[in-house]
Each structure stands twice: as structure tokens, then as C-alpha cells.
Image: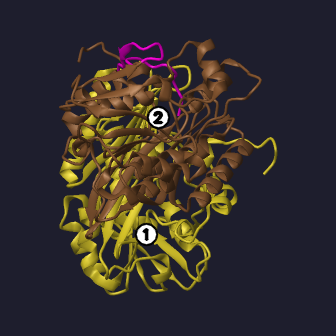
Chain colours: A brown, B yellow
Amino acid sequence: MSENERILLAHGGGGRLSEELLRNVILPRLGNSVLARLTDAAELMIGGTRIAMSTDSFTVDPIFFPGGDIGSLAVHGTINDVAMVGADPVCLSCGFIIAEGFPMAALERIVDSMAKSATAAGVQIVTGDTKVVGRASMDGIFINTTGLGVISPEVRLGANRVSAGDKVIISGTLADHGVTILCQRQGLAFDIPVVSDSAPLHRLAAALRVLGPSLKFMRDPTRGGLAATLNELVRNAPWGIRIDEQSIPMAPAVAAALEIIGLDPLHVANEGKLVAVVAAGSEERALTLLRSSPLGANARLIGEITNEHQGLVVMKTNIGGARIIDNPAGELLPRIC
Amino acid sequence: MSENERILLAHGGGGRLSEELLRNVILPRLGNSVLARLTDAAELMIGGTRIAMSTDSFTVDPIFFPGGDIGSLAVHGTINDVAMVGADPVCLSCGFIIAEGFPMAALERIVDSMAKSATAAGVQIVTGDTKVVGRASMDGIFINTTGLGVISPEVRLGANRVSAGDKVIISGTLADHGVTILCQRQGLAFDIPVVSDSAPLHRLAAALRVLGPSLKFMRDPTRGGLAATLNELVRNAPWGIRIDEQSIPMAPAVAAALEIIGLDPLHVANEGKLVAVVAAGSEERALTLLRSSPLGANARLIGEITNEHQGLVVMKTNIGGARIIDNPAGELLPRIC
């Protein structure tokens, strides 16, 4: 790294620069076998129990948005990271960093929202910390949540279990969260309002676990969107992924907003969706399991793992062509979560 | 709370306003039996193992200071919170929030420092997250660390085990961290430099645990200093604490700096000291155990639990008087940790 190099917004964007920061700066220094796995949550064995641990800091701006707020997002986001490695979430910690002068009523509303989200998810917030920083040094509020979950002995999930022929499923419509935040920030309004999909995915993930070994991999496509998630999955893999543009579910209002804004839905963050890779032959059962929950009502088979184009994500477009889906390099939208 | 009430720096100061925020805003909303204990770390039972979990966000300014930096402080601080409930720390998570434009070299130095501190402490950093925020919204870097530890079945620590006659011990000199940060920030320099005491206390705490049930309570006096720690201990208790000013250890340079600055050493943050309450008769052994480590070389007996002045901390002063040591109300020094 150059002496004069500086952190860019894109280093936090979940795409290529985020990955470079992780691989060039963080991992060589902090690296250990647990961290190096780069799963949504670390897996630890403590006292004979498989424990998942995940941390996430939330800096979303605006802090209140249609479908949620920074508090509910912080609860859901960490629950989801824990759930994606196959764990049942147990508890969360909560660290607030608040700017001096922040309205107490807004803090109360955020804490209310965290309490409601945690209770609905059946997860307790067991420990916390509050720091206050002068208003010259930051604005608003940042929240870190760290979550613990328990993984059943029989759960075996991971990119290393994926093989050609496996099917790729998304649990619902794409891009709702990112488009909602962007519209709020830009003051865009549509006839049909767009609403964040922020939601806890642990029950949906648990439902899929009844597939047993046929469930091979799960991840929630947040920062960097579906494109980053699928590119991470094919990285160094001896196979590729083919997805079908026509099969990708999108809310009509979100699709319309994306047309106007000019963003690729595959690059936009989701906060209540999961991608699952299942063995061929299990896709119908997986879709049925997902659709039995309102959170998975719009689940769709979007593609499959292929022996072709190793290490690449290729999309069959609506007009019949094929295009390579790249990992987003930059930062589409800072403070999306 | 009033409609117009706003967050003050003192709400993060570790004293009276911090406690009010916790009791009036956070606990009534998030409250559960684990959180309500308000120990340094939550205690959970997962798969038959007693697990301690603690979270802390670090916003210290300046980020590099004599004796450490925000990275080592973040590792030590959370290790210490986990150790104070009698746990052996196992692992940490690490969440970075970084301002756009932050020098990459400074980040590398901080991550190096975290790696060195974690390795020295025998603790792994197993999961992490990085967010980047626009430079208009914050400056510098904030780090959240959340730690897990394992508590042995026989450990029984808590304010409820304390009773009149017990002895109060401090593991070393007071106020080193807070005075160091303040001197850095004010550009004060002394002939004998002051240095932060930031250090991992888990081995010192483990050494004290050989006292068995005679070890009753431990806490590290960080924000709000010894005054906040002792006041929290006497809160709603049927006893009081008497400490002896003459017995309180302080580095000469720190004492001199405090004279100039005009701060009470009991209100200033420490980052490598613990307060222990032990049964009468165990104090000499406790001191020997502490002094066998360089981190506890200046351990001293500073007072005892009394039947008198219930709910109060009273100090016998150097000139023979007595004064009530109050919980600091305000924020002496924002961004101390």
C-alpha cells in the first residue's frame, strides 16, 4: 500500500475494493483459520457446542426509512448473518455511538424499534455500551450489533459443498432496501411507495435446513447486492454460475425506480433476502419451504451451478444474450446499512 | 423525557448521566434479566457452558498515544470486561467504522497493533466488519470489539456476595490512561512522560480466582474512574465503602499532572487496573497474587466494606478528614476510550 493511500467510500461498499482491503490489509495481520473462512459468521467450538458469532456496524442514512430504521436494521442484519451459517440466533450485543446533540426522542424511538425487532425474532439483547462523541466529530448515530447463535451438529454448509448442477434460489424480490434508502435520500417519491425489505431471516433459513445435506450454502445479499454474493461464491471455484434475468423477482415499483435511477438491481443491497444453493432435485421442495412463509412468498429459482465459465457469474439476459456479472468495484450508495 | 431533550457528552461519560440514560431509556425498553444485571459482561448459558459476552465501542482521540492506540485499547478493553466477570476470554469480533480519506497507513498500524495485542493475550479475532462513512459525517476511526469468554462452573462473583468487613484492593496506580489522553490532547508534556496503562487484565484476574469464594467481586475502573466503580458497587447496597486516600497508588508524574490540570484522580479513567473485593483475611494473599505479575506490581489495599454510611463511598483524606466520593455527574473528558 502506498504511503499516501487513503480509505475510499468503496472500501466499505461490499464489492471489489472491500475485498481488497480485507485480503491485503486485514487478513494478513489478523488472519487465523476461523477469520480466513470469510463466512457471514465465524464458527467456534466452545464447550462442545458449535457457536456462530457475527458482528456488523450500522451507519444507515437516513436513520428512519419506510420499512424500518437503523435499530430494526441492526437487529435483523446481525440475526441474518448468524442464520446464514445455519445457526439459530440466541442473543445480541448492542453498541451505540451517538453524536452530542442527538435528539433523545429519536434514540427512544430507535431503542423501541430494536426491542420490538428482537422480541419478534425471539432474540435477547444481553449486553451493551454507549459512547457519545462531540458533534464536530460525527453526526447522527451508529449502532454495532454482534450476535451469537448455536449450530446443530448435523448442519454442513459452505461454498466447498457446492458442485455443478446445484440450483440457485433467491427468497424474494431484489433491491428493495437499497432503492428505498436512495429514494429517501434523493427525495424521490413514486405512486407505489418502495419499502425496505429489512427482516429477520432465521426462521426462513431454519425452514430450509429440513432439506438436510441437500441445502449446501446460504448467504444474504446485502452490500454489493446479489452480484457480490454470487461473485464471492464463484471466487477460486472450479465451476461457474448461470442465472436467468427473466427469473429474477422484482417489485414493480422498485423496477421502475431502478430504471429512472439507472442502477443495476444485481448491485443493490437487500436486507431481508437470502440466496440458497441446493442440490439438483431439491429445488421444488426448497421453493415450497420458502413460500410457506410470507418472507419467502416470492422465492424463485434463478439459476444453477455450471461446469462452464469457471469462476464467473453469467446472466442470460431478457433479450437472449449473455453477460458476465461483475463484482461491483465502487460504492454505489454509502451508508446503505 | 422531554421532547426537546438531547444527548449530552456526559451521557457517555460513565457517571450519573450515563446511568440515567441506561435506567430511563435503555433498560425499560430492552430490559431482560441478563441485561439488567449490568455487569461488565453478560453471562449466558449456552449448551451447558457459562459464556460471558461483552461489547465496547472505542472512539478515543488521539488514536495514537503513549502506551497504545485505539487498536490495542479496543482489544484490551473488551478482554478486560470479559475477565471481570471471572471468564477466560476466548475470542473477539471487530467492527471498524472509518471516515473516507482516513490514511491507509494509519489503518495498517492500528490493525497491526490489534493483532499484536490479541496474540499477546492469547485471544483470536474471529469475525469482523468494515464500514466507511463520508468525511462530512465523521472523522477518524471508531472500533467496536465484542468478546466471548468461558466461566468455570465454580466461579461465583457479584456485588451480592459482598459484605461488611470485606477488603477493597486496587491492582496498581490510578489515572494513567486518562491523564495521558488529556496531556496528548492539550499538548502538555512533563519531564517524566505519562503513559497509558492499557493492558489485558485476564491473567491478573485468573490469578486472583485461586482465592476461590474469598474473591467476591472484580471490575475495571474505566470511564468515570474509581469513583464510578465504587459508587456503582454501593448502589442500593446495605453497606458502604471506606477508602483511605493515603493508600491510593499514583505515579508521581500522573499526580503532578493532575495537580496542574485540577482533576480528581478518582474520576479519571484507567485501562489496565482492576478493583477487587475479597473476604477479610484474604487481602494479603490477594496482594501477593497480584504483585507476582508486573501488571499488579503496585497493588494496594485501599479500603473496606463497612456497616456504616450505607450506600456511600467515604474517603479518609490525607489531612485526616472524611469526604463523600460522589459519582461523577458530567463528562470530564470525551473520547477517552
Horizontal and vertical percent position of residue B61: 44, 34
Q: Amino acid at mark 1?
A: Glu
Q: Amino acid at mark 2?
A: Thr
What range is drawn magenta here? A317-337
Give the prevailing secondary structure in the magenta stretch. Answer: loop
Identify the mark at residue B252; answer none if there is no mark: none
In contact (CB < 8 Å): disc 1 and disc 2: no
Horizontal and vertical percent position of residue A165: 27, 38
Question: Does residue B106 sit above or below A117 in this rendering?
Answer: above
Q: Chain of mark 1?
A: B
Q: Nearer the viewer, residue B216 or A139?
A: A139
The residue singled out by tag 1 in the image is B43
State which quarter of the image contains the C terminus of chain B.
top left
Mark 1 neighbour class, 10 Å CA radius: few under 14, some 14 to 19, many 20 or more: many
Q: CA distance from mark 1 to mark 2?
A: 31 Å
Say which element carries label 1.
strand
**A324 in magenta:** yes
Q: Residue at x 55, y 20 (%)?
A: B136
Horizontal and vertical percent position of residue B27: 63, 61
Question: Does residue A34 sit above or below A327 in this rendering?
Answer: below
**Side of A43 relative to A150 (left or right):** left
Q: Nearer the viewer, residue A197 or A133?
A: A197
**B11 in magenta:** no
**Side of B50 relative to A119 (left or right):** left
Identify the mark at residue A222; answer none if there is no mark: 2
